[in-house]
Amino acid sequence: MEVGPRARSLRWQLCIIYRIDPWFCHSNEPYRGSFGPYGHGMNMKATRIHSPGGPEGLVYEDAPQPYVGVGDVVVKVHAASFTPGELDWPVTWVDRAGRDRTPAIPAHEVSGVVTEIGYGTTGLQVGDRVYGLTDRHRDGAAAEYLAVEARDLAVLPDTVTHADAAALAMPGLTAWQALFTHGRLTAKQTVLIHGAAGGVGTVAAQLARDAGAHVIGTGHGQHHDVATEAGVHEFIALDQHGFEDAVGQADLVFDTIGGHVLARSAAVVKPGGTLVSISAPPPAPADGRAVYFIVESDRTQLAELAEHVRAGRLRPFIGATFPLSATREAFLAKRDGIAGKVVLENA
């Protein structure tokens, strides 16, 4: 039985909305598979969470392999990483239309190898080593395979490990966008980084110093050595000193901490300077800009970051690695305060 023009038109609408198997999009045969992002009929191992809650609810189990949708690629995951609070995000539990999408797969920072290419995909090919930050409304990379929009990935140089790439994706993009996209940082300016020993802060310190800025970092006193290793010229222990008098004024303040630290930061921004925060909307400086943003994946920026790593100008800080089968333990370790990025490896 052949499919008519009106049915083919409907197929294209379904393909675009639901990212259905591209065979369905082009074939004149009736569709015999299953709708949505899954339906190969083959299983993989993945860590999933079936209802809202903490990491105790993460389960390593069989799950259906994803289809490649329009504009997607499928990646064989070699390494993944995560943000500790992502199990609290509303987008973990619902899709863009607000529909329940559990069981959900966490970890949206990925590095691996492309195994399938979807219709309309450009810039990547099967066999490419890639890394990136995936859409939070879709399943993450705590799995053997991941379907992801191709535009969210960049090609990874052969000399950069998958573990380093997975640890870099979220902190690297966040730091880059804070410093250069929103903060407009240039050489010889002064930047104050609150939380300079954290996953984002250590990358921001390295990038800012590499750009020729004078870098001042803050954090807990016990993190002095980590922040110094990351490249800060000066470090202020927030548990021992106030930062206002020690800093003077800065062209750019980048806050990753929030709370009273963010509330006091507008006072140290130079006239014409910028206060950027990823923790909460910041107070506006008297004569400057205030920016709050949520990181987005960007292929060009990912490529720049990977080149920095390849050239030895940037190093992600990995605190621990766990096998994919121990994703729950990895989340618990991060919740308990392990420093640096935690990486999941899929052998």
Image (cartoon, rainbow, N blue to C red):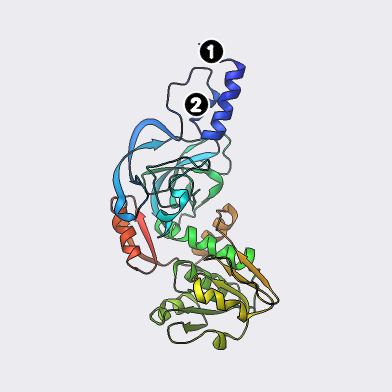
| For residue 247, side relative to residue 186 (left or right) | left
Which labelled disc corresponds to residue 56? none
Residue closest to the eye, 19 or 130: 19
- Is 317 placed left or right of 178 in the picture? left
- Mark 1–mark 2 distance (CA, rounded to whole Å): 14 Å
Quarter location, residue 88: bottom left
**Picture layout, residue 6 above or below residue 174:** above
| Residue under the image location 54 percent in, 31 percent down | 15
Circle 2: residue type: Trp
Say whether residue 124 is left or right of residue 60.
Answer: right
Instruction: Decide which of tag 1 and tag 2 comes sooner along the chain.
Output: 1
Q: Secondary structure at mark 1?
A: loop
Q: Position of residue 235 (x, y in %)?
A: 49, 83
Q: Is residue 293 above or below residue 10?
A: below
- The location of residue 220, given as percent across then percent down, is 42, 79
Q: Which residue is mark 2?
A: 23
Say few, some or many: other residues with alpha carbon within 10 Å of mark 2 (under 14 / 14 to 19 / 20 or more): some
Q: Could you say which disc has been placed on residue 2 in the image?
A: 1
Disc 1 residue crowd, few under 14, some 14–19, many 20+, Cα 10 Å: few
Of 270 and 153, which appears nearest the observer?
270
Which amino acid does the dot numbered 1 rest on? Glu
Return the residue nearer the eye: 22 or 101: 101
- Above or below for 268 versus 321: below
Location of residue 321 in the rendering, given as x and y in whole percent from the top left corner: 33, 60
> Residue, x 34% and y 64% (percent of image)?
335
Numbered disc 2: secondary structure:
helix
Please state the total of marks drawn on the protein image.
2
Q: Residue at x 46, y 51 (%)?
A: 90
In which image quadrant can residue 179 be found?
Answer: bottom right
